[in-house]
Image (spheres, helix red, strand yellow):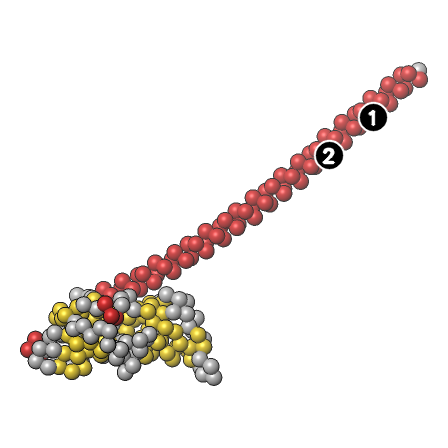
Amino acid sequence: MEKILRSSLLIIVLVFLAWAFFFAREGTMRTFNSLRAGAMDLFSASSTTDRIQILTLQVKDLEAELSRVTASSTAEGRYHYKIAEVYSEYPYNDGGTIIIDVGSADGITAGMPVMASEGVLLGKVTSVRRTQSEVETIFSPKWKSSVGVGNGRIKAVVEGGIVPILNLIPKEAELGSGENVINLSSDYPLYAFLGTAGNASAVPNDVWQKAELTAPYRFENLVSVLVVTDFP
């Protein structure tokens, strides 16, 4: 009888252990699966965030390129150009002006806009002789013109120099490096491209910011330019 009781008790213990192991295993697996699902969700969210950031940057790049192309194409096709060769003054040209080989005999007059290439504003004709003209460029200390910066066309003023400066940028404006700069002055073709802006920095004790302007060409390497003969 005692032997039977012991056997029954052993069976009960084994059954209990088996039951406990089964449910403990199920709970462990559920916990593991929950943790794994959470980790996958987190990883997925992280990957999604990364993809969103990458796509956002790509969209910004495409918007900037579209703005540049639109600005250039707006100026292209609307005007007639006179191709002019540039006289070399290297290495003495530090005044931001150039001499070109066309003049009054070619129909050139003072005030005509001059482009480094189609859609890219370089400067304007300031004086004319019969076969030559002088051009003041954005690299001249005398140069000042109104521009728009970035897709929002934030207003600023280009001040010429060896390194042209974008000045009078509103303090609250948020500009990143590489924003397109386009012409807004009525003296030159609207939306003509000037270059890209560097990072804006605050002017001490002032309500404005300023940034450097980088042209899409090297001033000293100019060989030929385009004079706009029918503007405005």
Q: Looking at the rendering, in which quadrant would you find the C terminus?
A: bottom left
Q: Residue 56, how many percent across, how many down?
A: 42, 57
Describe the element under mark 2 as helix, strand or loop: helix
Residue 34 seen in the current view: yes
Describe the element under mark 1 as helix, strand or loop: helix
User: Residue 137 appears in which quarter of the rendering?
Assistant: bottom left
Residue type of the residue flagged with mark 2: Ala
Residue 13: assigned label:
1
Residue under numbered circle 2: 24
Q: Nearer the viewer, residue 160 or 79?
A: 160
Q: Residue 124, how many percent across, how many down?
A: 20, 77
Residue type of the residue flagged with mark 1: Val
Local crowd at mark 1 within 10 Å, few (<14), some, or many (≥20)?
few
Q: Nearer the viewer, residue 179 or 21?
A: 179
Q: Is residue 42 left or right of residue 92?
A: right
For the point 31% across and 61% down, the residue is 65
Q: Residue 204, how many percent across, how many down?
A: 47, 81
Residue 156 seen in the current view: no
For the point 70% across and 33% down, the residue is 25
Residue 87: assigned label:
none
202 lies above or below 176: below
Q: Disc count in the image?
A: 2
Local crowd at mark 2 within 10 Å, few (<14), some, or many (≥20)?
few
